[in-house]
Image: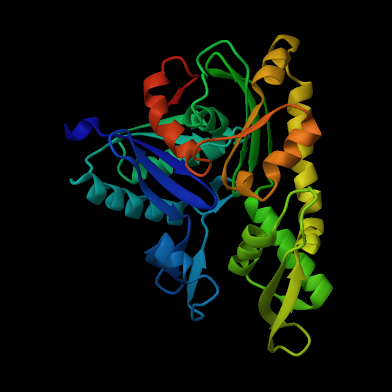
């Protein structure tokens, strides 16, 4: 029984999710690790570590070991995975002994990056590790009929990357990946407020601004928000009022880059499948798909229906877990 535990892991830049087919999503934590720089000891992972970002003494740093959907710091990622496996074991009610794991990788990941992900998961105690491409996992998680010879166009806007893929018959027909996602939008907001107001704000503040008054490129009623940060001239704390129009302007370039990626993917689509896309439309998933007005904006721009996945934040993890059943028909990479 112990050896047969099967779990899916969405090793995301922003969040790390663990899915078990019996219990659904069992772990959903930010991909953040707090470490003591002197001893290299991991002090906290997940939510506990995220709460420390920007608030720790000098020798403790809260870091994100995943960058653009791939591993930036191998040792810390391994530690993070071990901690999460322990949490998953507690939720499942027993100590996970050597589970079979499916992990998703960005479609643009190199073989070296894929091997790093496999090794990190192996070292956290997995028996076998299968890799699945992120867009395929997102499509399965969004309940799309990926095994049928019908075009399914999925746009997964994650923290580090946006993946656009046409999936048919269990495989990726055409795919484009761009290293722009939710994190880049946060960065755009930080840079804009710095340039415009000489005010330095942190990642968490930028994310909050994006979620509350960030809009895709659609007409909307202006909304205002107070933003607190450090004045770069005086060095003192300061509060300013920011408009949703300004934030829209700040993130415009990144949004247009995402749109361009979708267009390129559509242009590369075989004509037979293009007809399916016109009928069935596009499915968007990932945290970025929840940006205010995103669905409306994309459907105006690409003139096909745009649907939001049932659980946009969990699509990839759910699909990763479910893919164990459809693994035979999917292109699989086994270790």
Q: Residue at x 75, y 62 (%)?
A: 244
- The quarter in which the C terminus is drawn is top left
In the rendered structure, the answer to whether residue 270 lies left or right of residue 30 reads right
Q: Residue at x 75, y 90 (%)?
A: 234
Rendered location of residue 175, percent (x, y): 67, 27
Q: Is residue 95 visible?
A: no
Rendered location of residue 163, percent (x, y): 64, 36
* Nearer the observer, 50 or 228: 228
In the rendered structure, the answer to whether residue 23 lies left or right of residue 76 reads left
Rendered location of residue 258, percent (x, y): 74, 41
Rendered location of residue 177, percent (x, y): 67, 36
Above or below — where is 320 with respect to 215? Answer: above
Above or below — where is 270 with respect to 142? Answer: above
In the rendered structure, the answer to whether residue 10 lies left or right of residue 256 reads left
* Nearer the observer, 103 or 312: 312
Q: Residue at x 74, y 34 (%)?
A: 299
Above or below — where is 306 with respect to 239? Answer: above
Q: Is residue 69 visible?
A: yes
């Amino acid at each position: 029984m112990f050896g047969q535990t099967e779990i899916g892991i969405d090793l995301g830049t922003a969040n790390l999710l663990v899915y078990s087919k019996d219990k659904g999503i069992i772990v959903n934590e930010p991909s953040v690790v707090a470490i003591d720089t002197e001893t290299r000891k991991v002090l906290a992972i997940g939510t506990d570590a995220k709460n420390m970002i920007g608030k720790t003494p000098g020798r403790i740093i809260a870091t994100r070991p995943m960058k653009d959907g791939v591993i930036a710091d191998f040792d810390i990622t391994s530690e993070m995975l071990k901690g999460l496996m322990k949490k998953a074991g507690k939720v499942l009610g027993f100590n996970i002994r050597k589970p079979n794991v499916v992990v998703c990788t960005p479609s643009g990941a190199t073989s070296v990056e894929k091997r790093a992900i496999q090794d990190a998961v192996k070292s956290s105690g997995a028996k076998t590790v299968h890799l699945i491409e992120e867009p395929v996992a997102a499509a399965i998680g969004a309940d799309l009929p990926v095994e049928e010879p019908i075009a399914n166009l999925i746009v997964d806007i994650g923290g580090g990357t946006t993946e656009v893929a046409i999936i048919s018959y269990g495989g990726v027909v055409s795919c484009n990946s761009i290293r722009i996602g939710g994190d880049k939008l946060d960065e755009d907001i930080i840079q804009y407020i710095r340039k415009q107001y000489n005010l330095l704000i942190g990642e968490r503040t930028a994310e909050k601004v994006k979620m509350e008054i960030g809009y895709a490129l659609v007409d909307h009623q202006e909304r205002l928000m107070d933003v607190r940060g450090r004045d770069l001239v005086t060095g003192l704390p300061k509060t300013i009022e920011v408009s949703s129009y300004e934030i829209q302007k700040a993130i415009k370039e990144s949004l247009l880059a995402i749109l361009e990626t979708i267009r390129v993917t559509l242009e590369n689509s075989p004509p037979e499948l293009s007809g399916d896309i016109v009928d069935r439309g596009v499915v968007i998933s990932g945290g970025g798909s929840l940006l205010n007005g995103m669905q409306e904006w994309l459907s105006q721009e690409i003139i096909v229906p745009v649907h939001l996945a049932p659980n946009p934040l969990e699509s990839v993890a759910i699909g990763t877990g479910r893919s164990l059943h459809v693994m035979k028909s999917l292109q699989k990479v086994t270790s």
